[in-house]
Image (cartoon, grey):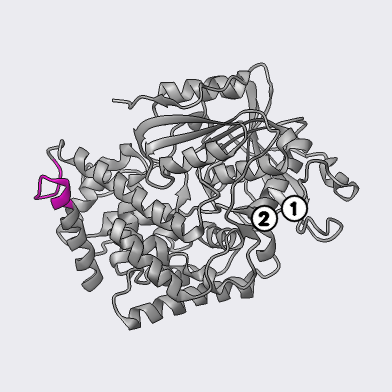
C-alpha cells in the first residue's frame, strides 16, 4: 500500500542520552484515483440544500480553538437517508480576515483536527492573520464516524507479518493475514465502507465550504491531501479560490506501479540519508560508501528476519524485519530526524531495535498502552475503495519481485502492503486516470526533489494534467515542502493563498543549507 502521509515530528529516543502495516500501512497514503466519470457536482441539488444551508454551532475547545460538527449524507446518491457527522476545529484569524483555510495532513487516515491543533507551527503568522484555520477529520477518520476493524493486539499481529515472504509458508501467512484484515473491516464497518472514498470526502468539503460562508474554497493539502484537493477541483472547478497541493500524488499512475514508484522514492531518500551520515562523526556504518552502507542495511534486515532484535519496552513484541523497515522509514520523512535514525541504527547493529520500534509506533500512531488510532484501518479502507487493485494475490507477488529489483529495501513491503485490497468486501469506485479540473483558477502543485513518499515526478504529473496547474519545486529532502525551512517555498505559497498570485510556472526553490 502506498505511503502518503504528512511528516510526523520524530522525537529523540527517550532513553540512552541524546538521543506490515508494513511500509504501506504505517505511512499510509494512497488514493490516486477518483470515481468513475460522473456529472460534476458543481451545484447542490434541492435534496442537498439542507446540508448546504445548515448553521454550525461552535464551542470553545481549548487553547484558542473552537470545535463544531457538520452533518453530511452517508450516501450522496440518497441524501434523504442516513446522516453522518464531520468534526471540525477552527483557529480564528488574528487580523483582517479573508475567509477560511481548510487543511488536510494526508494519509489517507490522518486527522485534520490534530493537524490544525499545530497550526501555529505549520502555517505562517501571515496566513493565520488572514484566514480562519479549519481542520476536519474526513469521513471514516478520527472523530468523523471512524472505521474500526481490529483490536490493538490484532493490529500488532498484522503489522508483524513478514512482508518480504521468502517461503510458500510465509506467502500463505501474508495472504491469510491480509484476508483477516479485510474480513474484520467487513464485519465491523460494512455500513461505512462503500462511502469513505475520496470523492465522497471531496463532496463533504464543498458542504463545509458553504456552511463556513466561503464562495470559493481555499485549501492546503499535503501528501494524500493533494489527491483530495485535486478531486475536489475536478468536481467543483468553479468553487475553487486557491488550492495548494504539497507533496503531490499523481492520480493517473496505476495502483501497483504507484507502489513501485513510491518504494523507489524511499530508496532515494535512504541514499541521501546515508550520504549525509558519512559527514557526521557518529555515523554507525563501518563502510564509508553509500553502496557499502546499503549492504549493511540489507544484512540488518536479514538478521531481524531470522532473529528478532531486542525489545526493551517490555510489551512482548518481536522486532522483526517488518518493524525494522517501518522504523527506518519514519525518520526519512524529515531531514531533522536523521540524527535520531543514526542513533537508532547504531543500537540496532548491536542487536537492540527498541528505538526503531518507537519510531514505527509513532508512524502507526500506536499508543504506549497498545491501542491504535484508527488511521491504519481508515487508510486501508479509503485506499481499497479508491483504487481498482488486482484481486489475484499472484499480481502482488509478481509486483513485489519487480519492485524489489529497483527498490531492494522497500519494494516488497510497499507492494505486499496493498494485499488486503484483493480481499476487500466492497467494490472499488475508483479508476486511475487524469484529473483536469477544467475551468478552475490557478492551482499550485508543490514537489520536493527527494521526497521519500511522494516522488517529484508525481508533482510534475499532477501539475501537467490539471488544466490550471502551476508547478513549484523544492530542491530538498523530506516529505512536503511548505513550512519546512524554505523561505522561497513559504513566500510563494503565502503570496498565492493571500493575494492569489501564483509563482512562475516551474519555479525551483534552492536547497536550504
Vertical comparison of 229 with 199: above or below: above
Residues under labels 1 and 2: Cα distance? 8 Å
**Could you tell me which secondary element the residue under label 1 belongs to?**
loop
Residue 474 pos. (x, y %): 40, 30
Is residue 324 toward the left or the right of residue 466 in the image?
Answer: left
Does residue 33 appear in the picture of this structure?
yes
Quadrant containing the C terminus in the rendered view = top left
Q: Residue at x 40, y 66 (%)?
A: 399
Q: Is residue 106 above or below residue 102?
A: below
Q: Nearer the viewer, residue 394 or 112?
A: 394
Q: Where does residue 34 sit, x and y in percent of width and height?
A: 63, 52
Task: Tell me the residue that label 2 is attached to.
Answer: 35
How many numbered discs, if any?
2
**Does 300 appear above or below 316?**
above
Position of residue 311 in the picture relative to residue 78 (left or right): left
Residue drawn at (71%, 33%), measured in percent from left and top? 439
Q: Which residues are magenta?
A: 282-293
Q: Residues within 10 Å of mark 2 (few under 14, many from 20)?
A: some
Q: Tell me which corner region of the image, top left, top right, bottom left or bottom right, holds residue 43.
A: top right
The residue that label 1 is drawn on is: 38
Looking at the image, which is closer to me, 307 or 233? 233
Residue 20: image x %, image y %? 40, 65
Amino acid at each position: 500500500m502506498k505511503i502518503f502521509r504528512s511528516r510526523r515530528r520524530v522525537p529523540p529516543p527517550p532513553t540512552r542520552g541524546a538521543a506490515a502495516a508494513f511500509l504501506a500501512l504505517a505511512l499510509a497514503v494512497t488514493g490516486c484515483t477518483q470515481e468513475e466519470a460522473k456529472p460534476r457536482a458543481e451545484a447542490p441539488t434541492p435534496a442537498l440544500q439542507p446540508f448546504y444551508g445548515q448553521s454550525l454551532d461552535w464551542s470553545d475547545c481549548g487553547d484558542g480553538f473552537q470545535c463544531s460538527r457538520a452533518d453530511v449524507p452517508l450516501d450522496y446518491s440518497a441524501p434523504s437517508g442516513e446522516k453522518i457527522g464531520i468534526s471540525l476545529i477552527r483557529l480564528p484569524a488574528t487580523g483582517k480576515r479573508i475567509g477560511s483555510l481548510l487543511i488536510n495532513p494526508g494519509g489517507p487516515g490522518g486527522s485534520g483536527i490534530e493537524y490544525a491543533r499545530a497550526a501555529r507551527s505549520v502555517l505562517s503568522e501571515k496566513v493565520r492573520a488572514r484566514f480562519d484555520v479549519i481542520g476536519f477529520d474526513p469521513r471514516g477518520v478520527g472523530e468523523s464516524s471512524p472505521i474500526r476493524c481490529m483490536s490493538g493486539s490484532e493490529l500488532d499481529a498484522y503489522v508483524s507479518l513478514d512482508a518480504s515472504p521468502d517461503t510458500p509458508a510465509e506467502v500463505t501467512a501474508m495472504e491469510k493475514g491480509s484476508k483477516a484484515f479485510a474480513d474484520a473491516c467487513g464485519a465491523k464497518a460494512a455500513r461505512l465502507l462503500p462511502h469513505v472514498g475520496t470523492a465522497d470526502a471531496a463532496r463533504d468539503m464543498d458542504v463545509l465550504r458553504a456552511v463556513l460562508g466561503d464562495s470559493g474554497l481555499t485549501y492546503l493539502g499535503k501528501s494524500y491531501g493533494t489527491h483530495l484537493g485535486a478531486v475536489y477541483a475536478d468536481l467543483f472547478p468553479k468553487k475553487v479560490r486557491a488550492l495548494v497541493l504539497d507533496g503531490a500524488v499523481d492520480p493517473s499512475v496505476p495502483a501497483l506501479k504507484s507502489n513501485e514508484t513510491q518504494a523507489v522514492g524511499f530508496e532515494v531518500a535512504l541514499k541521501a540519508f546515508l550520504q549525509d551520515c558519512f559527514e557526521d562523526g557518529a555515523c554507525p556504518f563501518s563502510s564509508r560508501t553509500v553502496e557499502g552502507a546499503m549492504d549493511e542495511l540489507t544484512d540488518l534486515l536479514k538478521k531481524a528476519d531470522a532473529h528478532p532484535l531486542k525489545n526493551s519496552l517490555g510489551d512482548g513484541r518481536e522486532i522483526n524485519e517488518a518493524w525494522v523497515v517501518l522504523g527506518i522509514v519514519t525518520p526519512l520523512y524529515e531531514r531533522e530526524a536523521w540524527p535520531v535514525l543514526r542513533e537508532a541504527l547504531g543500537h540496532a547493529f548491536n542487536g537492540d531495535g527498541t528505538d526503531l520500534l518507537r519510531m514505527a509506533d509513532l508512524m502507526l500512531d500506536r499508543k504506549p498502552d497498545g491501542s491504535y488510532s484508527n488511521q491504519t484501518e481508515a487508510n486501508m479502507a479509503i485506499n481499497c475503495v479508491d483504487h481498482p487493485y488486482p484481486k489475484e494475490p499472484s499480481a502482488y507477488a509478481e509486483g513485489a519481485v519487480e519492485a524489489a529489483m529497483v527498490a531492494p529495501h522497500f519494494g516488497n513491503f510497499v507492494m505486499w502492503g496493498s494485499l488486503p485490497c484483493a480481499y476487500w468486501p466492497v467494490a472499488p469506485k475508483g479508476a486511475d486516470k487524469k484529473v483536469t479540473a477544467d475551468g478552475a483558477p490557478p492551482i499550485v502543485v508543490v514537489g520536493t526533489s527527494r521526497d521519500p513518499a511522494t516522488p517529484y515526478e508525481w508533482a510534475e504529473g499532477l501539475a501537467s494534467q490539471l488544466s490550471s496547474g502551476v508547478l513549484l519545486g523544492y530542491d530538498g529532502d523530506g516529505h512536503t515542502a511548505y513550512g519546512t525551512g524554505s523561505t522561497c517555498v513559504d513566500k510563494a505559497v503565502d503570496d498565492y493563498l493571500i493575494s492569489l498570485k501564483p509563482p512562475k510556472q516551474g519555479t525551483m526553490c534552492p536547497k536550504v543549507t
